Image: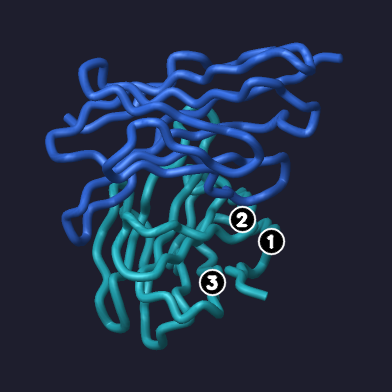
Amino acid sequence: EAQVTQNPRYLITVTGKKLTVTCSQNMNHEYMSWYRQDPGLGLRQIYYSMNVEVTDKGDVPEGYKVSRKEKRNFPLILESPSPNQTSLYFCASAQGDIQETQYFGPGTRLLVL
Amino acid sequence: AQSVTQPDIHITVSEGASLELRCNYSYGATPYLFWYVQSPGQGLQLLLKYFSGDTLVQGIKGFEAEFKRSQSSFNLRKPSVHWSDAAEYFCAVGSNQAGTALIFGKGTTLSVSS
C-alpha cells in the first residue's frame, strides 16, 4: 500500500531534550516536506527536500533540522525543543515537483513541557 | 504577498443540502490550486486540483471547484452533503516554479447537522 508513515504518532517531551520524528514513504517520491499545523494558522511549511541531499527552508524553519540521506526517509530533528514547538506535524511526499499531488502522513502530535 | 484566504472559519450545513466553501488567493505567478480535506485525527487527503484548462474541476467524493481568475477565487462545492463530509477543508496554492512551497489557507471546519 502506498503510504507515508510517521513515528512516533504522539510524543511528550521536556524543553531542551533532543528528539527526532521519522518520516518514510514507499512511493519512490523525490519531493518530501514537513509542515506544522496550529489552530487558526493552518499548515505552514518547515523544510522541504527536492531530492537526496537537497533540502531547503520553508516558512518556519527556526528550531528545526532535517536530513535526506535516503530517498525514502526525511527525519525532522528538534535539537533543543521549546514549548512554542508544541504542534501537530505532518510529513508529505510527492513525485517530482510541488504541483504533483502531495501525500500526507497521519501526523505526529508533539507536546513540549 | 502570496496568501490564501478562507473567509469562513466554521460552516454548518444540513445533511442533503448544498455546500460552497470559499477560497481566495493572492499569487504573483500562474497559480496551481488545491483543495485538501482533513478528517478528525487523520492526515490531509487531496480532493481536487487545478493547473490549467477547464476551469471547473471534478474531484473525489462528489466535490467540484471552479477557478475564477477575475475574482482570484477557487471555491469548493458539493450538491448534497453527507454526514461523513464533516471535516476540515484546506485550500492551497502553489506555482510551477521548482522549489516553491504550497501555501495553505487557515482552513474551514464543516459540521453537518441531521
In space, the residues marked 2 and 1 are separated at their CA atoms by 6 Å
Q: Which residue is mark 2?
A: A107
Instruction: Give the letter of the cyan chain.
Output: A
* Above or below for A26 versus B89: below
The residue marked by circle 2 belongs to what chain?
A
What is the quadrant of the C terminus of chain B in the image? top right
Neighbour tally class for label 3: few under 14, some 14-19, many 20 plus, Cα within 10 Å: many
In space, the residues marked 1 and 3 are separated at their CA atoms by 11 Å
Mark 1 or mark 3, earlier in chain: 1
Mark 2 or mark 1, earlier in chain: 1
* Above or below for B104 versus A77: above
Q: Tell me what residue is drawn at x 36 percent, y 67 percent.
A: A65
Q: Tell me what residue is drawn at x 61 percent, y 70 percent.
A: A3
Q: Which residue is mark 1?
A: A9
Q: Position of residue A52 (x, y in %)?
A: 31, 83
Q: Are marks 2 and 1 in contact (CB under 8 Å)?
A: yes
Q: Quadrant of residue A22?
A: bottom right
Q: Quadrant of residue A9?
A: bottom right
Q: Position of residue A30 (x, y in %)?
A: 36, 75
Q: Which residue is mark 3?
A: A23
Residue B61 appears left or right of B32: right
Are the numbered discs 1 and 3 placed on the same chain, yes or no?
yes
Q: Callout 1, which amino acid? A: Arg
Are the numbered discs 3 and 2 placed on the same chain, yes or no?
yes
In space, the residues marked 3 and 2 are separated at their CA atoms by 10 Å
Label 1: state its secondary structure: loop
Q: Are marks 1 and 3 in contact (CB under 8 Å)?
A: no
Q: Tell me what residue is drawn at x 57 percent, y 48 percent.
A: B44
Instruction: Give the letter of the blue chain.
Output: B
